[in-house]
Amino acid sequence: MASTAVELIKDLSTPAFVVDLDIVKRNASVMLARFQKLGVQLRPHMKTHKTLECADIMTGGSRRCIVVSTLAEASFFADHGYDDILYAYPLPFDKVERCAELSEKLSLFHVLVDSSLALQELKRRPLKQGKAWHVWMKLDCNNGRAGVPHAEPAALQLAQEISETEGVELTGIYAHCGNSYGSKGEEQIKAVAQETTTFTLQFVEKLKAVGVKGPKSSIGSTPSCSHPVPDMAMLSEVHPGNYIFYDVQQSLIGSCRLEDVAVRVLTRVIGHYPHKNQLLVDCGWTALSHDGGGRLPTGYAVIEGHPDIKLVSMTQEHGRVEPVSGKLDFSQFPLGSMLSLMPYHACATAVMHPVYYVHSKGKIVGTWKPTRGW
Ligand SMILES: Cc1ncc(COP(=O)(O)O)c(C=O)c1O
């Protein structure tokens, strides 16, 4: 880990994104142990943090078996010794050549398709050294974003077509239960986890019945992998990512407790405006993101230790803070004092920062530099 001149997070220049290393390690080991016990391979997603250090923690040091959301992440991890990388994004046609190069360089690089046209693009670019494309088919199990709807004959047809295509191997079936984000509490999360698991496993059975044997199955999201159902033991893999940091959104869904949230944005008070009953802080949307739309009772974030104040709005570099009700006691928040914001959505907040300050009990132990771009 790189070092920094400042020793304590309370002395950092703000706004700053800070990561509690002890919580990160705990979140990682809980998830690793949970799926080891179920006998299912954990293939953690890198999209939340996009750093080598955090990837090492999530993979338990194996540097194998990860999911990425951008090719920039794929190249970054491949360049730093990672292998068995699944690019879990509907194959963008402008990126086939870069995918081919990664497939030729790594021992295992996987792509994802959900259309016959994408498959044709792969066929047009056979891999060198007699290698086969490792292809996962994206199945939509009622999430409703990407993938072929699980019950449509087109899903079975596409999987068969992939398995019969020369130079291509149908490695697995990938379903992402993003619909678990609409849940409230463990019971609802488990209902989505069960539905996605059942549809995915049924689909693999249907494939077997038509002679397509062997593709793996993978589902997952942070909510469903935080509260897995027993049938998930029949899957080959799971692919959660956000759990490494968790956030306020996850605590509201019921995936975690607020104590499990590993990240904060530190900000300082830069203005007192009694005529507006308002404080100004140096955290705008470039430091926190607008994700969540200010829907929390405390606005865009939970302000640690101050349930009575609310981040009501942000411009690019400024944040406005007001009391949840009544008159603001400005003496509690002197100019220059620090506030600690727990983000609504850690992935959206992390991506705003070029450097993460990593600490243990407030003492900075290093900095992590994420990769960016697509
Ligand atoms: C395709 C895909 N797989 C896995 C994940 C990881 O899910 P989560 O962020 O809930 O951990 C995501 C998250 O958006 C995703 O889009």
Image (cartoon, rainbow, N blue to C red):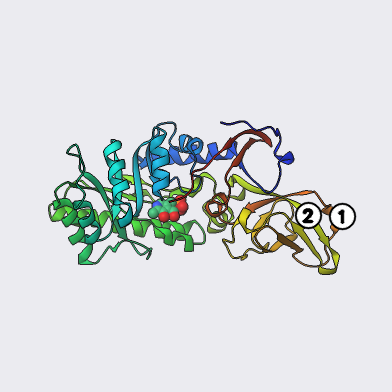
Say which element carries label 1.
helix
Kindly identify which residue carries mark 1.
331
Q: Which mark is first along the chain, 1 or 2?
A: 2
Instruction: Find residue 7 and report its image quarter.
Output: top right
Q: Within 10 angstroms of label 2, few (less than 14), some, or many (20 or more) residues? A: some
**Residue in the picture at 63% in, 63% down:** 296
> Label 2 sits on what residue type?
Ile
Q: Is residue 11 above or below residue 209?
A: above
221 left or right, relative to 139? right
Say which element carries label 2.
strand
Q: Residue 235's spot in the image, x, y percent?
A: 31, 47
Q: Are marks 2 and 1 in contact (CB under 8 Å)?
A: no
Front residue (pair 281, 64):
281
Which one is in front in this view, the residue at disc 2 or the one at disc 1? 2
**Residue in the picture at 45% in, 58% down:** 189
Front residue (pair 30, 3):
3
**Residue in the picture at 67% in, 57% down:** 317
**Residue in the picture at 65% in, 57% down:** 301
Q: Residue 346's spot in the image, x, y percent?
A: 56, 51
Q: Which mark is residue 16?
A: none
Q: Quadrant of the N terminus?
A: top right
59 left or right, relative to 94? right
Q: Which mark is residue 270?
A: 2
Q: Residue 299's spot in the image, x, y percent?
A: 66, 63
Q: Is residue 78 visible?
A: yes
Front residue (pair 274, 188):
274
Q: Within 10 angstroms of label 1, few (less than 14), some, or many (20 or more) residues? A: few
> Label 1 sits on what residue type?
Ser
Q: Residue 336's spot in the image, x, y percent?
A: 80, 49
- Label 2, label 1: how far apart the Cα atoms are: 14 Å
Q: Is residue 221 visible?
A: no
Instruction: Find residue 2 and report its image quarter.
Output: top right
